[in-house]
Image: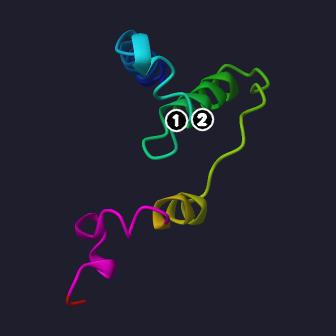
Amino acid sequence: MRASLSAAEAAISARREGEYGRWRDWYRGDWFVGFPVTRDILRANVALMSGEAPAPGRGVVGSSEVYRYQERFSENFPFLYRESSPGR
């Protein structure tokens, strides 16, 4: 579990290193991959296994909220969304 937490933190750090210039904070509102949420879950599990109280986590964005976010783009990018592709 600790190795997974270290790997998640390394992945988040690597993403941050790629954010510079106009791309700064690009992954800040990440909903789709969810590295920060995964890291929070791992932190809570490591704390519980150590007998400590887990730190409070952040709110989790549910899949319905993600789909609602994507619906705005289905008209502009119809071939990315099978339901709205021509002939469907």
Q: Which type of secondary structure does the marked residue at label 1 adopt?
A: helix
Name which residue type carries label 2: Ile
Residue 16 makes an appearance in the image: no
What residue is rendered at 22% in x and 83% in y? 86
Segment tinted magenta in the rendering: 72-86
Q: Is residue 74 magenta?
A: yes
Q: Is residue 61 left or right of residue 55?
A: left
Q: Is residue 53 above or below residue 24?
A: below
Magenta stretch, main secondary structure class:
loop
Mark carried by residue 38: 1
Q: Label 2 near label 1: C-beta < 8 Å?
A: yes
Residue 46 screen position, x and y as percent? 60, 24
**Image check: 57 left or right of 21?**
right
Residue carrying label 2? 41
In this picture, is 74 found above or below 54?
Answer: below
Is 5 part of what is drawn in magenta? no
x and y percentages locating residue 53 in the rendered image: 79, 25
Q: Tell me the quarter of the picture where residue 17 sits.
A: top left
Q: CA distance from mark 1 to mark 2?
A: 5 Å
**Relative height, residue 18 to residue 33 (above, below):** above
Mark number, residue 75: none
From this viewpoint, is residue 87 visible? yes
Q: Quadrant of the C terminus?
A: bottom left
Instruction: Tell me residue 37's x, y (percent).
Output: 57, 36
Depth order, front residue of 86/42: 86
Residue at 72 percent of width and 33 percent of height: 57
Residue density around tag 1, few if under 14, some if 14–19, many if 20 or more, within 10 Å: some
Tag 2 secondary structure? helix
